[in-house]
Structure formats: C-alpha cells, structure tokens
Amino acid sequence: MATTLEQLGAEAAGCPRCPLAATRTQVVFGVGHPNADLVFVGEAPGREEDLRGEPFVGRSGQLLDRLVLEEMGLTRDRFYILNTVKCRPPDNRDPRPLEIEACNPWLEGQLDLIQPKVVVTLGNFATKLLLGTTEGITKLRGRTYPFRNGSVLVPTFHPAAVLRGGGEPMAKVRADLVRAKEAMGLTTVTP
Ligand code: URA
C-alpha cells in the first residue's frame, strides 16, 4: 500500500481499471501541497489537462486560481487539486458511473494521505460522489457538511458553470470560497 502521494501517483500512472486507459494521453493524478489543509475536487481532465498531466490548467483552472486567490488569498502551492476521474473522457463527455467507481480508490487514497481539513467539491460529479447523494449541486451548495476524519466539505459550482453562467454563479462560488476559508480557520484579508 502506498504511504506517500508520490508512490500512489506512480501506481496510478499505469492504471488499467477502466476503458479511459485506452484513450488517455496520461493519468492526471493531482498537484499541490501533499499535506494541504485544503483540497479541491474537480470532475475529469479536459484536453489541456490530458496533454500537460496537471488538473485545471485550461480556462476553468485559470478562473479557479483567480477566485481562490481573491477570496482565500491562496496560490496553488498552498492547496491540493485533483479530479474525481483521473483520465480524460473522450470528447469531454461526462464521466460514466463505472469510470467514477473504478477511479474512486485513487481519490480515497489521496484524501487518506493528504488528510485535509476542508474539501471543496467543484460541480455535480465530485459533490454527489463524496456526499453520497443524488441531490444536485444547486440544492447542495451554500452550506458546509461534516466529512471524513472530522473534516468539512464545501460544495460549489464547477468553474466551467461560472464561465457559462457569468455573474450569478460567480458570486455564489465566491461566497462558497469564503465559507471554505472560514472552515480552514483563516481570517478574511481585506485588500
Ligand atoms: N475540469 C475539471 O473538472 N478538471 C480539470 O482538470 C479541468 C477541467
């Protein structure tokens, strides 16, 4: 059993557990601080992530980085970011239930090793999986949930939904990030 994220990532790099193994360029395991208090959980890699091997490096990721910096004062070296499904679904289709299930042990392993205080789920797939519910993100966001090992889960919209939806979802994501910051015990910084 892997005892470090590096070891787990090396094991995941050759993962054959679902059909996405045949179409991916590489497994996009996750990046950031290995003992971060804060973990973001996205959906699945897109084209740029599949090519670069890093989560959230496209437009959604740039927006997320900006909002996290503005609302929480944190840069990527201070948190960890990963996806529910580690390989790109072809043509950016939604991940399938079997793919999410096959990939879940990697996600569980990552959370066990990182032991964050706060987990922010981005969008429906991560939120439904980690809260074990079929309820949608619109209903679930806006509050914190007790999560494993005394941590807290803060669901919010996926940044792609903000790119599509504009000001209203953006204001809600900002509010959720402030919620996450408070849950981390960080004080609000006035610019
Ligand atoms: N969207 C995600 O959910 N994850 C990524 O890594 C990129 C876009």
Image (cartoon, grey):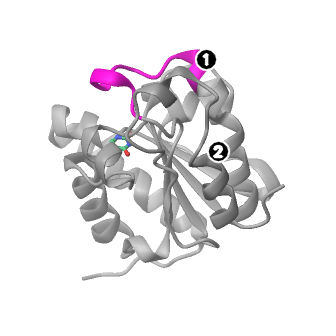
Question: The N terminus appears in which quarter of the rendering?
Answer: bottom right
Tell me residue 147's x, y (percent): 72, 47
Q: Is residue 157 visible?
A: yes
Left or right: 12, with 91 as reference point? right
Quarter holding ligand 1: top left
| Dot 2 crowding, Cα within 10 Å, few <14, some 14–19, many 20+ | many
Left or right: 10, with 58 as reference point? right
- Marks 2 and 1, how far apart at CA: 14 Å
Residue 97: say if magenta: yes
**Residue at left offset 52%, top offset 51%:** 29
Tell me residue 185's x, y (percent): 59, 74
In what element is the residue under mark 1? Answer: helix
Look at the picture and state if 56 lies above or below 24: below
Query: Which residue is labeled 1 in the image?
Result: 98
**Residue at left offset 64%, top offset 44%:** 107
Depth check: 128 or 55 in front? 55
Which quadrant of the structure image shows residue 39? bottom right
**Residue at left offset 46%, top offset 36%:** 87
In what element is the residue under mark 2? Answer: helix
Left or right: 168, with 5 as reference point? left
Left or right: 34, with 170 as reference point? right
Which quadrant of the structure image shows residue 177? bottom left
Specify the amino acid type for callout 2.
Leu
**Residue at left offset 64%, top offset 73%:** 35
Please state the extent of the stretch shown in magenta in the rendering. 88-99
Task: Tell me the tag on residue 107.
Answer: 2
| Dot 1 crowding, Cα within 10 Å, few <14, some 14–19, many 20+ | few
Depth check: 84 or 99 in front? 99
Question: The C terminus appears in which quarter of the rendering?
Answer: bottom left
